[in-house]
Amino acid sequence: MSEAGSALATQFDDLEQQHDAATLGMWIFLVTEIMFFGGLFAGYAVYRSMYPQAFAAGSRLCEIALGAINTAVLISSSLTMALAVRAAQTGRRLAIVALLVATMLLGAAFLGIKFVEYGHKYAEHLIPGSGFTYTGPYAQQVQLFVCFYFAMTGLHALHMVIGIGLLAVMAVLAARGRFTPAHYSPLEVAGLYWHFVDLVWIFLFPLLYLVDLHK
Amino acid sequence: MSEPTENYLNAGYGLKSWLLTTDHKRIALLYLISITLLFFVGGALAGLIRVNLLTPQGLLVGAETYNRLFTMHGLIMIFFFLIPSIPAVLGNFLVPMMIGARDLAFPRLNLLSWYLFVGGSLLAIVSAVTGGVDTGWTFYTPYSTTYSNSHVLPMAAGIFITGFSSILTGLNFIVTIHTMRAPGLTWFRLPLFLWSLYATSIIFILGTPVIAITLALVGLERIFGVGIFNPGLGGDPVLFQHLFWFYSHPAVYVMILPAMGVVSEIIPCFARKRIFGYSFVAFSSVAIAVLGFLVWGHHLFVSGQSIYAGMVFSFLSFLVAIPSAIKVFNWTATLYKGSIAFDTPMLYAFGFIGLFTIGGLTGLFVASLAVDVHVHDTYFVVAHFHYIMVGGAVMGYLGGIHYWWPKISGRLYPEAWARLSAVVIFLGFNLTFFPQFLLGYLGMPRRYHAYPPEFQVLHVMSTAGSTILGFGYLMPLVYLLWSLKYGALAGSNPWGATGLEWRTPSPPPTEDFEHTPVVAEEAYAYSGEEAEQHV
């Protein structure tokens, strides 16, 4: 079986059709992801407009420095991801693997920093629920903010974990030489997902960390 | 005629060849079996509800159990039968065949969607047998978060998981229709069934994730005791209603749009005429999907929503009547001077048009602000949405099952029994639900296990009708199964229909077509001469 033949699934006529289907499929999946996160963003928007002071107070509980570092880490990971796809287009197998590993390491660094932040929240009794303690005004509404903080960053972190797993599979496939300049759609599609997860963070960071900064 | 030698049914007999199949036709049958089981579970619950309402004090059960009965009936019928029904069964079977492809774009995702559906259904059944849910199918907060002692979490998790099966189905359909059409099959030569499934898929893609995150938030609130929807802790229960109906109103169109697509296939075939106004019928499907996302607030007219928002939502809800009426008028115009054959699928299609029209027009009553205040949460609403969901969606589903049964099974069903079933279902349906319009208008609230004695006559009529309806639904189950063994061989095109799916043997081979078909004409190219041959 030729190389193109082994990469082509039986329901498709040629690699181009298969590539179009894979790419369109991922874009549509990302639309569902936007709607999925969109429900949380809508809830956040409603409560922020109802309780602006409490959301500002809640935002002060976030550690801007760690959030900013994480933003830089994630943007760098998007760069290495894009370079990995570029390496596939130019047929440099080792470069694909190296860049994918770099992307995964940056993703893991992001999760590590996030974990530290969660640890601080835990130590300060800021986990929503019966153990939540906050002494300032609007304690209930600040708890609501923290709820959204954990729901949104937690859902994002879950997507990061899935993304790292996905990239691990891609790295193995790349090491086995499964991607060629003619056929690299799985890698490109995984890249689309990674960039999307990155982009969600670009929205989360100002919405959660920087609410009160302009004063 | 000899038995076709090689087809998708005899391509392998082991359990593994079914449970690990990626053939869209086999996955359609897996769905058919699963949702048929769930349909009869949901139907049995409806039967218990109707028996209980025979007497004013409630014949069988107390208020607590009754709450669980109608909640489980609604949840199973909506999330585990109606939403997957036509897309997952007929859509999975027909989308690749109607466009001349060998399979859907992502066959393994398709199989995964069935497993997600089964997993979600099992969670729902676990929730049911351990005591059920008593919040109403709408999960309104704070019932579902603070006050309910029932099994909300497994049920919400089941719906969450099943939602992903819908998303995968919708994604697969959109990608397949975009990228895998046979040579010559332009967008405006597509069968209208595919336009309606495309519109349905848009709703799956845009709506389902929102109900998923909403139910996840309900779960979060129940598990951690936080107050996202709890006013005592700063939350807003009406926000839940907004998020819930943002999906759940479009979900009504998930149920009705595919049925409209089925009717658009059946009517030209049995009237032997081209569809009247093809592009209007096609675009009206898209219009319904789009408008469907802008009307959710008509469920919140009495929930403390601003009166101006209510006026806008009322106006937008009226707009939905336009594309719906376009369809009904175009079907009627197709029938005009047609050579009409009263075969079973056509009887179901006629039933659909009549019942959908009543359901749709009463939808305008409840979309009017002032009238809604009177009939809100009464049996009028119950009757209205059953005319759409049962009179519309289920009639369309059964019409489609009959129309494509020869293609699916390779056998003809007994025509006389099938026509009888269509008539019995139509009569039973109307006897069940028309009295409920009267009950609601007279002030009988929904979800009550007891009622004032003056309503008893209408309730007894409704229960009598539901018994007839139940028998009507059992009939196809029996004779369709019978036909698998004893039915006459169907041949590739028993109706003399146009459409690529009829150009391949029944049952079709695993790869659908021996040679990729080439399309050279529009859909529904029926002619008068053919009509005479058909007689």
Image (cartoon, coloured by chain):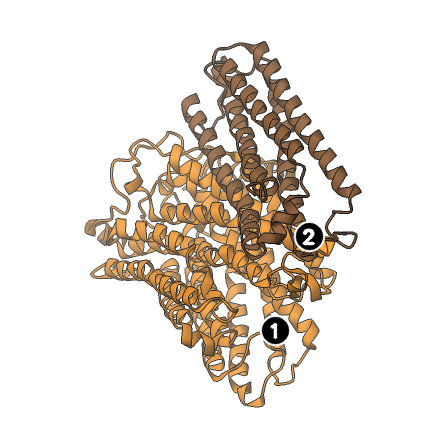
Chain colours: A brown, B orange
Residue hosting label 1: B49
Residue A187 visible to the viewer: yes
Name the residue type under label 1: Ile
Residue drawn at x 54%, y 90% as measured from the top left: B454
Residue A145 vs residue A82: left or right? right
Q: Are marks 2 and 1 on the same chain?
A: no
Residue A197 bears which disc, if any?
none
Residue hosting label 2: A143
Label 2 residue SS: helix
Q: Position of residue B11 (x, y in %)?
A: 54, 34
Nearest the camera: B212 or B29? B212
Residue B505 visible to the viewer: no
Q: Is residue B339 above or below residue B450?
A: above
Q: Position of residue B426 (x, y in %)?
A: 43, 69
The C terminus of chain B: image quadrant? bottom left
Tell me the chain of label 2. A
Q: CA distance from mark 2 to mark 1?
A: 42 Å
Q: Position of residue A47 (x, y in %)?
A: 57, 54
**Nearer to us: label 2 or label 1:** 2
Q: Quadrant of residue B187?
A: top left
Nearest the camera: B44 or B452? B452
Q: Sort mark 1 into few (<14), some (14-19) or many (20+) by Cα contacts within 10 Å.
A: many
The N terminus of chain B: image quadrant? top left
Tell me the chain of label 1. B
Q: Sort mark 2 into few (<14), some (14-19) or many (20+) by Cα contacts within 10 Å.
A: many
Name the residue type under label 2: Gln
